[in-house]
Image (cartoon, rainbow, N blue to C red):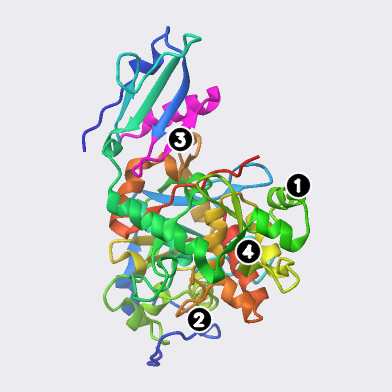
């Protein structure tokens, strides 16, 4: 294991990640659990995307692009929150300002967290059931990151430098001894725990969700209000439609 | 949290709900009149076991009978029945105003029509086709942020491309997407990237966000 230190380093893709005995303590086996996922709206079809989608679009922290487009299992991650708030932070945290507290001289929009009407009317929140027995490497455990080495530290869960974080996702993904990761989104605090599930034959086929119609975030009013208080964001009311 | 699901008021056979008025925490009202939308909203309320809702009908102060004899029904999330917090309301107003005033403010429709020499009709077509940034005031008049234009009053190419990605009339979504310094660290706005010649980077950032499934 490397003893390199320092945040912001890309993953050592030329080195294989293995679950050596010292790392086995950080592999968490899931119990059957209901988790939360925000999914978007397909504008072309004018309907919600399905709640289960293993992304390799290169759109967020962990979804690196597939190195082999012909291999369906060479990439693809599904990020879910263990609590409602965790899913909110992971989806909207990246569009909130990097300065997270009001600062004198800054315009309110430069330092406040908001959701706009589109965010709550065109994003859906669904519950997904994770089965028992998935092996997730728990990055939230004390010592887990430092045991891996190679300069990995909590920076990876807080930064918006997604080009670098995705190299780490790819590095973990290649290890067939795990099915995903557990991490906490720093902007949401230690309680906002997320799972990153890897696209593997034994994972994607075991997930399930309620088949009832998807609910927009606005259709979870009580939870949304609670999340707003906990994460300190505001849902903006819409501006009026223009005069005809 | 107490859980109360009120069913009879909306499922009793002789009551046909033709209009639902819903209020959120800020007191914003949403009115549903389409039968399918009403049905969905009621289904959602019944299945939300964390929340509880009161459905008011005839006899309550917020309910009236239309002259066609149809019920008008108000549904309030019970948690949200209090008046909006004035402090929060003021903060939201200040936030929205800061978006409107950003980077030199905006031209009204009359001002822009005069400056650019285009018709109001053409301007409306631009709004409808998501090719110009605008926002509305309380009187529903449109305003056009100055920061989107070049010296010839043409909308910047990257602003146009990003508008096409967003394709929304949620004008607050558009303004926040351009103005909030959320890209990278310490945080720069899409508009700042465009202004500094990095429009491609701004476009890629917005594309990534809108691509999310």
Q: Which sits in the foreground, B149 or B172?
A: B149
Q: CA distance from mark 4 to mark 2?
A: 32 Å
User: Can you say whether B30 is above or below B196 in the image?
Assistant: above
Q: Which residues are magenta?
A: B23-49
Q: Are marks 3 and 1 in contact (CB under 8 Å)?
A: no
Residue B51, numbered circle: none
User: Can you say whether B82 is above or below B119 in the image?
Assistant: above
Which residue is disc 3 drawn over? Answer: B30
Q: Which sits in the foreground, B18 or A189?
A: B18
Q: Which sits in the foreground, A127 or A201?
A: A127
Q: CA distance from mark 3 to mark 1?
A: 29 Å
Q: Marks 3 and 1: same chain?
A: yes
Which residue is disc 4 drawn over? Answer: B207
Residue A16, numbered circle: 2
The tag earlier along the polypeptide, 4 or 1, is: 1
Q: Are marks 2 and 1 in contact (CB under 8 Å)?
A: no
Q: Look at 33% across and 21% down and name the residue there.
A: B56
């Amino acid at each position: 294991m490397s003893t390199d230190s320092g945040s912001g380093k890309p993953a050592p893709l030329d080195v294989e990640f293995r679950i050596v005995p010292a790392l086995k303590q950080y592999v968490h086996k899931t119990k059957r659990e209901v988790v939360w996922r925000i999914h978007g709206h397909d504008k072309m079809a004018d309907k919600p995307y399905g709640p289960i989608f293993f992304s390799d679009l290169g759109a967020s922290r962990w979804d690196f692009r597939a190195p082999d487009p012909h291999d369906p299992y060479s990439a693809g991650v599904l990020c879910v929150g263990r609590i409602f708030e965790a899913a909110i932070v992971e989806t909207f945290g990246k569009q909130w300002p990097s300065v997270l507290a009001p600062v004198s001289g800054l315009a309110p929009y430069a330092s406040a967290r908001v959701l706009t009407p589109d965010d709550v009317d065109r994003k859906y929140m669904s519950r997904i059931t994770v089965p028992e027995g998935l092996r997730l490497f728990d990055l939230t455990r004390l010592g887990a990151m430092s045991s891996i080495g190679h300069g990995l530290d909590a920076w990876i869960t807080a930064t918006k430098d997604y080009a670098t974080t995705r190299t780490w996702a790819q590095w973990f993904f290649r290890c067939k001894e795990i099915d995903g990761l557990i991490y906490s989104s720093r902007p949401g605090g230690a309680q906002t725990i997320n799972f990153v599930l890897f696209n593997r034959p034994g994972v994607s086929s075991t997930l399930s969700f309620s088949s009832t119609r998807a609910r927009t975030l606005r259709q979870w009013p009580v939870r949304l209000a609670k999340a707003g208080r906990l994460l300190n964001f505001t849902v903006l009311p819409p501006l009026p439609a223009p005069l005809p | 949290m107490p859980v109360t699901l009120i069913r009879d008021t909306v499922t009793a056979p002789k009551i046909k709900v033709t209009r639902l008025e819903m209020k959120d925490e800020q007191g914003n009202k949403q009115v549903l009149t389409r039968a399918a939308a009403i049905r969905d909203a009621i289904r959602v309320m019944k299945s939300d076991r964390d929340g509880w809702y009161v459905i008011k009908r005839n006899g309550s102060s917020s309910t009236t009978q239309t002259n066609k004899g149809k019920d008008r029904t108000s549904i309030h999330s019970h948690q949200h029945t209090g008046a909006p917090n004035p402090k929060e309301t003021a903060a939201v107003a200040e936030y929205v105003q800061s978006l409107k005033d950003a980077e030199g403010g905006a031209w009204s429709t009359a001002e822009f029509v005069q400056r650019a020499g285009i018709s109001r009709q053409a301007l409306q077509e631009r709004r409808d086709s998501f090719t110009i940034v605008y926002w509305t005031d309380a009187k529903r008049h449109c305003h056009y942020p100055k920061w989107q234009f070049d010296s010839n009053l043409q909308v910047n190419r990257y602003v146009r491309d990003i508008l096409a990605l967003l394709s929304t009339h949620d004008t607050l979504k558009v303004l926040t997407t351009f103005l909030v310094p959320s890209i990278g660290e310490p945080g720069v706005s899409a508009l700042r990237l465009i202004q500094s010649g990095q429009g491609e980077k701004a476009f890629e950032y917005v594309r990534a966000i809108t691509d999310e499934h």
